[in-house]
Image: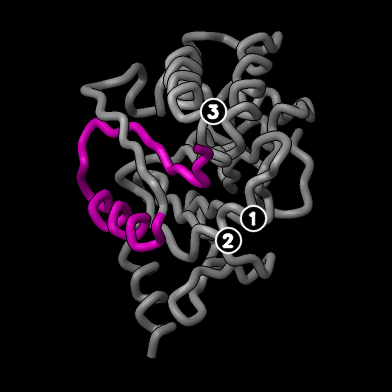
Amino acid sequence: MSKDLLVTMYCTNPKHLFDQYMQQLKTAGIDIYVERVTSFPNENSGGTAAWKVESFRRRALMFRDYEKIVYTCAWDMLFYGTKAEVMAKIPDDGVILGAERNCYPDADLAPKFKGDTPWRFVNGGPMAGSPQAILDWLDAFEHHPLYRPQEIDQRILNWMRAEDSPLTPLDDCTELFYCLAAEQGDLDFERGLPVNKLCGTHPNFLHFNGRSPVEPVMELYERSLR
C-alpha cells in the first residue's frame, strides 16, 4: 500500500537539535528514517558526490512505496507546519533542492549566478521529490559532464547551477526549505510559524547549516507567541 511522506537523513552523532527535530516531525505525523553512520567522506564539507549518490539512491529504492521523500540533515534542522503543507510543496514531477545565500565553496563563482532572490546558490543538504523523480535525478547527476565522484557534492551542484543546468531546480523563494547561511534578518515567525519576510513564504524546514546561531531564531519564535 502506498504511503504519503517520509523524511530521511543520515546521522553520525544525534546531538544539538536532533531530538527536538525528531519530536517536531513525529508530532506532525510524518514518517522518519534515520540512517546511522559512523563517518562519511569529507565530513566537514558534507561528503563526496559519490557517497551522496549511493546513500540517496539506496534510500529512494528502500522507500519506493512513498509518494514523496524529503532528504535533510539531522542535527541542525527544525520543522514547522503540517504534513499536508509539505506534500503540496513537493513537485509531482521532478525534484526541488534547498537554496542558500552563500556561494560555497567557490565564492568567486557568485557573479555568474542569475536569480530574482538572494537564495541563488545550491545547498547540498535538503532535497525533495517522488522516489522515481529522485532516482531519475541521481542518474542524470551521476552522468553529467561536470560530475566528479570524489568532489564535494555542493561544489558540483553550484558548478551546474552557474551553467543554468536543469538539474538544479532551486527552492529560491524558500517555500519549503530555509537555509540560514549568511542570514540577513529576513526570517521571522508569525504565531509560531516561520515566514520569509522578503518573499512572503512560509518554509517548513529550517536548516541552521551547522554554524548558524539558534538562540536568535528561538527568540523570534517565542516573541511570535506572545
Look at the numbered discs 1 and 2 and tell me whether their residues touch, using CB distance below 8 Å.
Answer: yes
Instruction: Specify whether residue 174 is in view.
Output: no
Q: Is residue 218 magenta?
A: no
Q: Mark 3 or 2 closer to N-term?
A: 2
Q: Which residues are magenta?
A: 1-29
Q: Residue drawn at (50%, 37%), measured in percent from left and top?
A: 1
Q: Secondary structure at mark 2?
A: helix
Kindly identify which residue carries mark 2. Answer: 85
- Residue type pointed to by label 2: Glu
Kindly identify which residue carries mark 1. Answer: 88
Query: Going by the image, does 193 lie left or right of 33?
Result: right
**Is the image coloured rainbow, by chain, by secondary structure, or in one colour?**
one colour
- Residue type pointed to by label 3: Gln
Distance between the Cα atoms at labels 3 and 2?
A: 27 Å
In-front residue for pair 211/167: 167
Distance between the Cα atoms at labels 3 and 1?
A: 26 Å
